[in-house]
Image: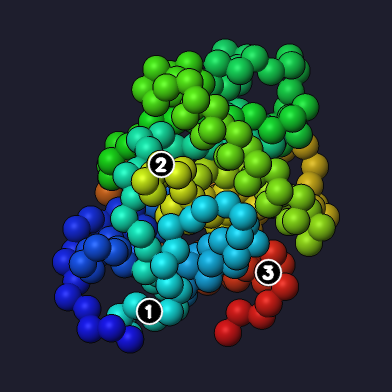
Amino acid sequence: MRRTTLKHIHAGKVRDLYEDGDELILVASDRVSVYDVVLPTPIPDKGAMLTQLSNWWFEFFADVPNHLVSTTDVPAEFAGRAVRAKKLTMVKVECIARGYLTGSGLAEYKRTGAVSGIALPPGLREGDKLPEPIFTPTTKAEVGTHDEFITFDDVVNQEGKEVAEQLRDLTLQVYSRGAEHAAARGVIIADTKLEWGWDGDTLTLADEVLTSDSSRFWPADSYEPGRPQASFDKQFVRDWSTSTGWNKEAPGPEIPADIVEATRRKYMQAYELITGRSWS
């Protein structure tokens, strides 16, 4: 283990970012964020589970360039929930792939019949599978502000046509391959958010990939379109927070102990089903 001199450079909704020379240490906390607000109650082991699931997926997508330098060469106090990563020039777009109609995509569809400018067939219900996965980018908001839908043309205007096409195609490729694997394990990946950055002139997968924080995971054996789905992700906390009458603005409500434990179990179920490994 090298001696490190860490400089804390960013606190995100869930992750803390440290600079260590010409590399970064990304630390996943146990914080939980819903509707772009960090709630005051942590979920025990959440950061470690997110990190270990991401690391498993990075290995699964070994042919897709990613930001990892080491999953073990991190300060001892962060062991298991941190990675050493390359410094990238991040693309200022949240790259979202959707295979099912739910969440903010459903709300946008109800308003406009489209999501991110992509027209969808009429009459779709909550939870319906889309004819094919779609790329629905959003802005990349700071803590305390909300992401906003943008169109593919907006990405072209910001990043250029070639880069926009790469972002779309890589995002849909990762989603589709991951969704196929998860489906064989009894998990539907309804949608996911990916982040990309530049390592020189190579688009590189960064941050996290196909986790319970960045994706919607549904149990396939209880899937039924036309209603909200059971989930293995933080949608459970979203639904609880909405039931309290909270206005979705900071500060968020404290999470009761039973909801904390149920959420922890859902994160653990997702990890175990997708990876085939036991959480310990």
**Within 10 angstroms of label 3, few (less than 14), some, or many (20 or more) residues?**
some
**Comparing labels 1 and 2, the label whose residue is closer to the camera:** 2
Q: Quadrant of the C terminus?
A: bottom right
- Residue beneath disc 2: 201
**Spot occupied by residue 183 in the image (x, y as percentages of width and height):** 78, 53
Spatial CA distance of label 3 from label 2 is 32 Å
Q: Quadrant of the N terminus?
A: bottom left
Circle 3 SS class: helix
Give the residue type at disc 2: Asp
Determine if residue 182 is in view. yes
Q: Quadrant of residue 158?
A: top left
Q: Is residue 137 above or below residue 50?
A: above
Spatial CA distance of label 1 from label 2 is 26 Å
Circle 1 SS class: loop
Q: What's the mark number on residue 275? A: 3
**Spot occupied by residue 42 in the image (x, y as percentages of width and height):** 38, 67
Give the residue displayed 19% in from the left and 64% down from the top: 8
Task: Out of 140 and 91, give the one closest to the viewer.
Answer: 91
Q: Is residue 207 above or below residue 119?
A: below
Circle 2 SS class: loop
- In the rendered structure, which disc, 1 or 2, sits on the residue that comes first in sequence? 1
Spatial CA distance of label 3 from label 1 is 22 Å
- Residue beneath disc 1: 73
- In the rendered structure, which disc, 3 or 2, sits on the residue that comes first in sequence? 2
Residues at circles 3 and 1 in contact by the CB criterion of under 8 Å: no
